């Protein structure tokens, strides 16, 4: 496969950073709004939850998908590869975990909250289903935001060395078989 030149890699980096900023910024925003904004009536509760859903749909999801796509392009079209560096592998695990967990758990938990708040107002804060989903979102949403921030540190610091020659030759061949 042909590799990107220096100019192409710079553009890819710009897009990758843009999408990572969306994802990390959106995740931190969701956490901070959940922990530090306290509604005083049902309309405020609904409005807050609706804005959380908006941030998820239009900032976090595009950021996560863009990070996934640009990360894929980095692995295919540059010398970073898939498993050549441990820090790249760690970022792949974080990214895939984030997209899968966000799609099948965090998203549905978040999407269930505004309709309940709209129907019940502040009484939603006593609804068992609402409280369960809200608590799961607080706990696991915070965990996901923290892993996204960790991925930023890993990207900048690149803390682990290149894999040894014995590992390097073996792992990509196994990965190639999985892809085929």
Image: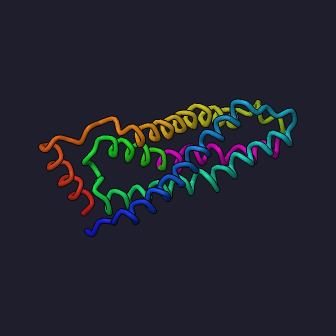
Q: How is the image coloured?
A: rainbow
Give the residue at the far front of this rendering: 6
Q: Is residue 101 magenta?
A: yes
Image coordinates of residue 172 in percent, x first then y, are 21, 52
On screen, residue 84 versus residue 134, left or right, reads left
Residue 98 is one of the magenta-drawn residues: no
Q: Nearer the viewer, residue 55 or 156?
A: 156
Q: Position of residue 56 (x, y in %)?
A: 63, 50
Q: Work out which quarter of the rendered image holds the N terminus and state it.
A: bottom left
Magenta-colored span: 100-120
Q: Residue at x 87, y 36 (%)?
A: 41
- Using the image, determine if residue 122 lies above or below residue 114: above
The residue that appears at 68% across and 49% down in the rendered structure is 53
Relative to residue 35, is residue 75 drawn left or right? left
Residue 39 image-quadrant placement = top right
Farthest-out residue, bottom: 2
The image quadrant of residue 136 is: top right
């Amino acid at each position: 496969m042909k590799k990107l030149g220096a100019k192409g890699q710079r553009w890819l980096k710009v897009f990758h950073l843009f999408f990572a900023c969306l994802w990390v910024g959106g995740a931190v925003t969701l956490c901070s709004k959940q922990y530090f904004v306290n509604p005083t009536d049902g309309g405020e509760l609904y409005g807050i939850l609706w804005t959380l859903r908006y941030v998820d749909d239009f900032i976090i999801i595009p950021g996560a998908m863009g990070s996934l796509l640009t990360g894929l392009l980095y692995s295919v079209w540059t010398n970073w590869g898939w498993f050549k560096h441990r820090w790249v592998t760690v970022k792949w695990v974080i990214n895939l975990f984030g997209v899968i967990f966000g799609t099948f758990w965090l998203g549905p938990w978040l999407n269930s909250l505004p309709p309940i708040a709209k129907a019940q107002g502040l009484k939603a804060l006593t609804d068992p289903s609402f409280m369960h989903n809200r608590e799961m979102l607080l706990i696991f949403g915070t965990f996901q935001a923290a892993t996204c921030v960790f991925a930023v540190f890993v990207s900048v610091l690149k803390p682990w060395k290149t894999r040894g020659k014995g590992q390097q030759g073996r792992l990509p061949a196994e990965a190639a078989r999985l892809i085929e």
